[in-house]
Image (tube, rainbow, N blue to C red):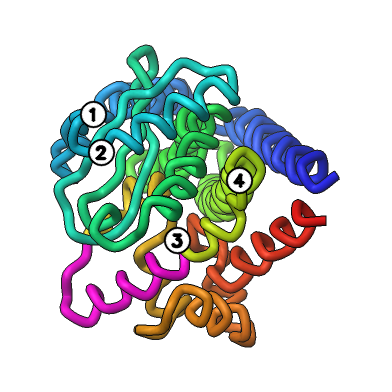
Amino acid sequence: MYKIKLYSTMIGTLAIFIGLSTLAIIMLSDYLGWGLYMGITLAVLFNLIQWILAPKIIESMYKVKPLPRDDAPYIHEVVEKLSKKMGIKKPEVMIADIDVPNAFAYGGVFGKKKVAVTRGLLNTLDKNEVEAVVGHEMGHVAHRDVSIMMFLSVLPSVFYLISRMALYQLYFTGGGRDRDSSPLIFVAIGILSLVFYFILNLILLGFSRLREYYADYEAATRIEQGAEKLMHALAKIAAYTEQKYKKKETITSSSFKALLIADPDTYRVDSRALYYKEDKLVEDILKRRLTLMDRLFELFSTHPNMVKRLRRLKQLAEATAT
């Protein structure tokens, strides 16, 4: 039932996103000249190029390379086992040579999908916890949601471009295509486009959080005691990353942080630097009271609030145990 509800919510969010953006484009395009269509074409092409080049950019940014089987055979075994369970081709197993514990799934439009773990993850988590993290990333691969996210990100940028073009046209032509055009129309188009840009980004961030819950569900149900293992893994990732923040050691990249299993920018809110055993660490985070600031901050995050995320995993753990 939980999976059906989650899947339906994701489909509904996509429908709202696509429907609203289509309606807005139809409405706004009627008021601008041919430059709009040229601009939209350029925006789409720019994002398509970024989509194609993204894997190389990610690998360069995070120092990613193939993970030899002899270095971590258990990870390759987990990926192979889950690939069979999910009915997908085995993604390539990669390692990012960075100290912060994290993991991500990525891949090109036509190229092979890849699952990467950081060296910090292997040094911080035990094998059971790494298995759960890999299961989460395999969920992203199975859902193809990384490609969907990158494709959807084109639409907000289109509205930002429309806003810029409307205001530029007002500035350079003094009002539009003919003398009867009111400058106020272009001001209104510019403001409305920015409003649509903001709303679509919020919806996109909401979809990003939903896909994290969905990937958590895959790890919880495809792996034995997956929910408990992932709870421990996420709690340790949050705590250890908090320590890295205090030392000014981060890997945050606003362009690609949606790929990570957890958003590094939220750890300062999600966790206090804890040194407890895993069960105590999870328990401490679960007891945290969600403030209004936590809920507002989550609206602008690519990932769910860690407290809410662990609570859902706890519910899944209890449901699978009965």
Quarter-of-image position of residue 265: bottom left
Local crowd size for mark 4, using a 10 Å CA cut-off: few (<14), some (14–19), many (≥20)? some
Q: Which mark is residue 138?
A: none
Q: Is residue 85 left or right of residue 176?
A: right
- Which callout, 3 or 2, points to the residue nearer the camera? 2
Dots 1, 3 in contact, CB < 8 A: no
Quick check: is 196 in the magenta stretch? no
Q: Which mark is residue 233?
A: 3
- Which callout, 1 or 3, points to the residue nearer the camera? 1
User: Magenta span covers which residues?
Assistant: 234-250
Q: Please provide percent x and percent y for residue 280.
A: 51, 82
Q: Residue at x 29, y 59 (%)?
A: 101
Q: Which mark is residue 224?
A: 4
Helix, strand or loop at label 4? It is loop
Dots 2, 1 in contact, CB < 8 A: yes
Q: Distance from label 4 to label 2 (Cα)?
A: 20 Å
Which amino acid lies under the numbered mark 3 shown in the image of this protein? Ala
Q: Distance from label 4 to label 1 (Cα)?
A: 23 Å
Question: N-terminal of the two: label 4 or label 3?
Answer: 4
Q: Please provide percent x and percent y for residue 303.
A: 51, 58
Along the line of sight, the residue nearer the viewer: 139 or 8:
139
Question: N-terminal of the two: label 4 or label 1?
Answer: 1
Which amino acid lies under the numbered mark 1 shown in the image of this protein? Arg
Along the line of sight, the residue nearer the viewer: 293 or 5:
5
